[in-house]
Image (cartoon, helix red, strand yellow):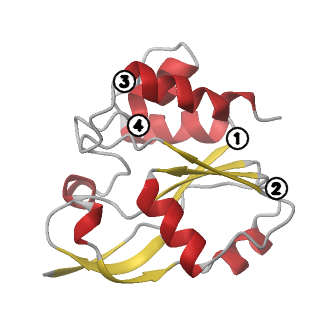
């Protein structure tokens, strides 16, 4: 079982909305890019929400997200995992969210990309940040067999945050 480490957050001082995954999968780790698996629907959902053609270049995707006030990170900093499934995660250690939210006080909304991210945050960090709204969304992972349209409908909520 391999030890894996998450990426640093993709954030800037204007970010108001944080999207949290659990920890990158094998393809993302290999490419050093969030949501790099070609069947993960994250980027397709984001670009569809804003009705613009999707960039193929990762740096342009990140710039687009930040331009809309979004940040990306993961709940888990380090863990052991075989493969890419969240169900295989063992001995996870979470990121330091108390320091993170202090450093980035503009974050007012946190959306979790799937159950594992939400449950790990709930259990290990907690929702004791009264100025922040927390919400779990359907996972964009290819392991989540829910139709794209249903995921998109739920993810619409991130677009209407003030």
Query: In the rendered image, which quarter is residue 54 located in?
Result: top left
Residue 88 vs residue 38, the one in the foreground:
88
- How far apart marks 1 and 4 lie (CA) works out to 16 Å
Tag 1 secondary structure:
loop
Instruction: Kindly identify which residue carries mark 3.
Output: 148
Q: Are marks 2 and 3 in contact (CB under 8 Å)?
A: no
Instruction: Kindly identify which residue carries mark 4.
Output: 42
Tag 4 secondary structure:
helix
Q: Residues within 10 Å of mark 2 (few under 14, many from 20)?
A: some
Instruction: Kindly identify which residue carries mark 2.
Output: 106
Up the image or down, 2 lies above or below 57; here it is: below
Nearest to the eye among marks 3 and 1: give it.
3
The picture places residue 8, in percent across and down from the top left corner, at 49, 67
- How far apart marks 2 and 4 lie (CA) works out to 23 Å
Q: Residues within 10 Å of mark 1 (few under 14, many from 20)?
A: some
Tag 3 secondary structure:
helix
The picture places residue 71, in percent across and down from the top left corner, at 60, 50
**Which of marks 1 and 3 precedes in the sequence?**
1
Residue 10 vs residue 86, the one in the foreground:
86
Rendered residue at 67%/28% (across/down): 159
């Amino acid at each position: 079982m391999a030890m894996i480490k998450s990426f640093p957050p993709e954030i800037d001082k204007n970010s108001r909305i944080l999207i949290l995954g659990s920890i990158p999968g094998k393809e993302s780790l290999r490419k050093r890019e969030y949501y790099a698996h070609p069947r993960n629907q994250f980027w397709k959902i984001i670009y569809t929400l804003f009705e613009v053609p999707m960039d193929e270049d990762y740096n342009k995707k990140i710039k687009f997200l930040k331009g809309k006030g979004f940040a990306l990170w993961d709940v888990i900093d380090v863990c052991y995992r075989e493969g890419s499934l969240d169900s295989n995660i063992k001995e996870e250690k979470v990121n330091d969210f108390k320091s993170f939210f202090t450093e980035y006080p503009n974050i007012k909304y946190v959306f979790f990309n799937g159950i594992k991210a939400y449950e790990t945050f709930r259990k290990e960090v907690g929702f004791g940040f009264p100025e922040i709204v927390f919400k779990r969304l359907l996972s964009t992972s290819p392991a989540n067999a829910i139709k794209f349209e249903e995921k998109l409908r739920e993810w619409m909520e991130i677009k209407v945050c003030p």
